[in-house]
Structures are given as structure tokens and as C-alpha cells.
């Protein structure tokens, strides 16, 4: 399956990287590489993530990357990364709105 990133997910990953880079630029670059690498594995193992409890839909899942949740949707022919969120961040239902809606 193909893995694509919604614009919101890219923007959130960039915001997180900027936050990390304020204190540790090298760590921010490594974090970006790692989060994209972890998301890329979803193409082969999309079902491994857990359902997102706030949504409770089978096709909306998450995998953890450190203190961050990579939230994605499984479509018939692709995996769409919807957002990346800190585990302590307040839930925003807009994060799971389909990017093409």
C-alpha cells in the first residue's frame, strides 16, 4: 500500500520539528527522519496500529513514536497520515477529517 501525508500532517510535523529545534537542532532533524520512516512502514503493516479511542472507527488508527501519536486512515489502496500529535495534546476532531473532504 502507498503511504501519503495529508497537508495537515506535514504542517504538524514541521511545527513539532521547529519546537524541538529551538533547543536541539540535531535532534529535530533526527526526529523528522524517524517519524517519516515509521510512517513509511505502515504501507506494509497498516493494521498494526491501535484504533484512535476518540474516534472509535476501524479505519482510523495510530502508532506511537516516542511521545507522539502518528494518526492515520487506512483506505482500500493507501494509508493517509492525517496528523502527528503529542500524547498530552488536547484532542481536535478536525484532525481526522479526510483531506479531500
Image: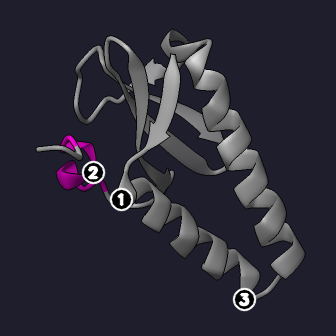
Q: Residue at x 36, y 59 (%)?
A: 8
Q: Residue at x 60, y 37 (%)?
A: 64
For residue 96, side relative to residue 51 (left or right): left
Task: Count neighbours of disc 3 (C-alpha within 10 A) and say few if under 14, some if 14 to 19, many if 20 or more.
Answer: few
Relative vertical location of residue 48 with respect to residue 72 in this rendering, above or below: above
Q: Nearer the viewer, residue 9 or 4?
A: 4
Residue 69 spot, x, y in % from top left: 52, 44
The C terminus is located in which quarter? top left
Element assignment for label 2: helix
Residue 95 falls within the magenta-colored stretch = yes
Disc number for residue 8: 1
Residue range of the region highlighted in magenta in the rendering: 91-98
Disc with the residue nearer the chain's start (2 vs 3): 3
Relative vertical location of residue 99 with respect to residue 3 in this rendering, above or below: below
Alpha-carbon distance for marks 1 and 3? 21 Å
Residue 94 falls within the magenta-colored stretch = yes
Q: For the residues carrying marks 1 and 3, which lies nearer the camera in this image?
A: 1
Q: Residue at x 35, y 30 (%)?
A: 52
Report if residue 46 is visible in the image: yes
Residue 78 spot, x, y in % from top left: 41, 22
Residue that sits furthest to the bottom in the current view? 22
Q: Residue at x 48, y 59 (%)?
A: 10
Q: Disc 1, disc 3: CB below 8 Å?
A: no
The residue labelled by disc 3 is: 22
Disc with the residue nearer the chain's start (2 vs 1): 1
Amino acid at each position: 500500500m502507498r503511504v501519503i501525508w495529508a497537508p495537515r500532517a506535514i504542517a504538524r510535523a514541521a511545527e513539532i520539528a521547529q519546537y524541538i529545534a529551538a533547543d536541539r537542532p540535531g535532534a529535530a532533524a533526527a526526529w523528522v527522519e524517524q517519524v517519516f520512516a515509521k510512517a513509511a512502514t505502515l504501507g506494509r503493516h497498516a493494521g498494526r496500529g491501535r484504533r484512535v479511542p476518540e474516534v472509535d472507527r476501524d479505519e482510523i488508527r495510530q502508532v506511537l513514536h516516542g511521545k507522539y501519536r502518528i494518526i492515520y486512515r487506512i483506505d482500500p489502496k493507501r494509508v493517509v497520515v492525517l496528523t502527528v500529535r503529542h500524547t498530552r495534546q488536547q484532542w481536535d476532531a478536525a484532525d481526522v477529517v479526510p483531506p479531500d473532504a
